[in-house]
Image (tube, rainbow, N blue to C red):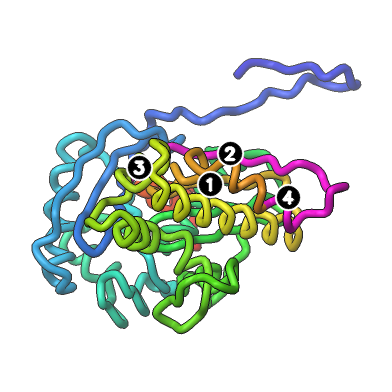
Amino acid sequence: MGEYQDGRAGRPSRPLDIKPDSRHFLGMKLTGENLQGVVTDLRAAVLYSISRSLPSRAPDDVADAIAILVSDLLEVAPDATALGIGLGGRIAEDGTVCSAPFLDWTDVPLRAMVESRCNLPTVVQNDVIAFTEAEHWFGAGRGLERFAVVTLGAGTGYGLVEHDAIVSNDDAGIGLVGHWPLDPLGPLCPAGHRGCAHSVLTQPAITAAVSSGVGRKVDYAEALSLAEAGDPAARRVVDDAGLGLGRLLAAIANLTMPQRIVLGGEGVQLFDVASDAVLEGIRRDRDPRAADLDIVTTPGDDVEWCRGAAVIAIQTYVLGTAI
């Protein structure tokens, strides 16, 4: 990048940069119904995306579907270096899916199954960890020593980077933040917890509550639209969820003191629709002397998850080791 003189004695430094188009990577997001994939460059810029429905959740059928999607993506990037796959669940270091409730999987050797079909180096990782690493290396957390990530969608996810490294252990992927209590009078979650993040913040919880309130079945987008339009039942449900989100953000800030909190996931629009309630929830649980929270939202589309999976593949290639 040329020479750089910082005013000190000695020869000027010569900063280096990568050539983004020198390598390409594939990233995939796996859910219980769909598979989406992207091609990125070495800076994780998405160059192409494609999605397919899964024929079933059977591991062999899913691995076959991944192989077909890899073949499609290789037509765009035949020189792809590696593949990253992200999914909700607990993942072992060898790429075995220890548990994935959305797929009804236990101990599925996904990495080995995919590599045997695709002949492409593959890394499998929890999707929230992958999303957090994407923000760490290339997103809103870049250059920060400490930041947190919260994802909203079918579940509630949480990631933390401390001392410029992600915080993780064998419990990552269980969805522990989903059990965080938010409303002592709230609904029960499947585990029997009253008013936890899972029962207050997730898309299924919000759509079920709004559907009950308006007397007909609605999806998440319509639930938020009804709230914006002033429907009393939808407004109450969405504001209750926003209040819970604010309390969760306050708890994260109080306990980990991040420089920034990044909100993502397909349910992230809740933050905008219920912004007043979110701020009220933060105010309730934060000391008035505390600094305002630096909160950044991301677009919330499936491509974000795929990009995160590609970043895990990029890290594995650059660092020479899987996370």
Distance from disc 2 to disc 4, alpha carbons, whole Å, reads: 18 Å
Residue at image point 71% right, 43% down? 293
The magenta-colored residue range is 282-303
* 45 and 224: which is toward the camera: 224
Relative height, residue 188 to residue 55 (above, below): below
User: Which badge, 2 or 1, is on the more N-terminal residue?
Assistant: 1
* 295 and 44: which is toward the camera: 295
User: Which badge, 4 or 3, is on the more N-terminal residue?
Assistant: 3
Instruction: Mark yes or no: residue 123 visible.
Output: no
Mark number for residue 296? 2
* Circle 2: element type: strand
Query: Local crowd at mark 2 within 10 Å, few (<14), some, or many (≥20)?
Result: few
Percent coordinates x, y for residue 58 in the rendering: 15, 73
Amino acid on which the number 1 mark rests in the picture: Leu
Distance from disc 4 to disc 3, alpha carbons, whole Å, reads: 26 Å
Residue 317 part of the magenta segment = no
Drawn side of residue 166 relative to residue 76, left or right: right
* Circle 4: element type: helix
Mark 1 = which residue? 263
Mark 3 = which residue? 226
Residue 287 part of the magenta segment = yes
Amino acid on which the number 2 mark rests in the picture: Val
